[in-house]
Image (spheres, grey):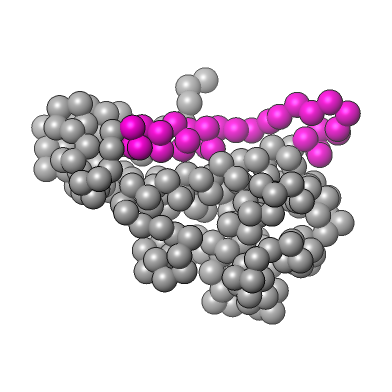
Amino acid sequence: MSSTEVLEWDKFCKLEKLYGVNSFSFPSSTSHGEVYRFGARFSLASDLAKVSINGRTQNTSDGYAQLMRTVMAWGVVESFFDLKGISINHETQRNSHMVPNYDVTQLALLKSKLGNSQCIKFFRELKVHTNPTHTTKLDEYLNNPNGSYDVSYLFSAIRHVFAHGILTPHTGKVTPKVTVKICKSLVEFFLGIVNAEFGQIVRSHADYASV
């Protein structure tokens, strides 16, 4: 089975070889290596499915696999916006450059998946271990799961807490299957945004049609 590549990756590689990274609409400081590392990270986050952990049930292992995948996927989103000279860890830049890319229909579907009592239990426990910004944003979700909160803070909160060794597939006394569902839903939504945006950058290249 072949690995998953970001949209228009093959075309990007051909164009980059002929014209260089700076022929795309990235800032002049963006390097060849940064784009290729992004591509590799996208593939890994897309394709990670299973991990084997001695002494754990398959359900628990699956939960850990998706938590790991969430950390990787957040890194993909960060690195993609870094290619564009944007730091999405700053709230104003996140609001200005990432939130406008949300597809309204897909966003409504994601919020419907995250609005049940089991997901709320998971994030209520997660909130205890977050920094003040994430605490505020998670409160917006917890107070109104179908409201206007920014779903990216649920995503980055998982990354933050799991990377610090606190989060497990049983957080909030939910089953690992709930954790898997939460992580998969967020990862697929945000990798979809990155996928579409990178493809658009490649298709906008002046010589796209000639290669």
Is residue 44 at all visible to an observer of this figure? yes
Q: Nearer the viewer, residue 199 or 126?
A: 126
Q: Is residue 69 left or right of residue 93?
A: right
Residue 30 picture location, percent across and down: 28, 43
Rendered-image quadrant of the C terminus: top left
Q: Is residue 188 left or right of residue 53?
A: left
Residue 146 picture location, percent across and down: 62, 74
Q: Which residues are magenta?
A: 33-61
Residue lying at the far top of the rendered structure = 1
Answer with the quarter of the image where residue 119 lies: bottom right
Compared with 166, 46 (above or below) is above
Residue 189 picture location, percent across and down: 52, 53
Is residue 39 at all visible to an observer of this figure? no
Judge whether residue 155 is colored magenta: no
Q: Nearer the viewer, residue 36 or 65?
A: 36
Which residue shows up at 48% across the image and 22% down it?
A: 2
Answer with the quarter of the image where residue 130 lies: bottom right
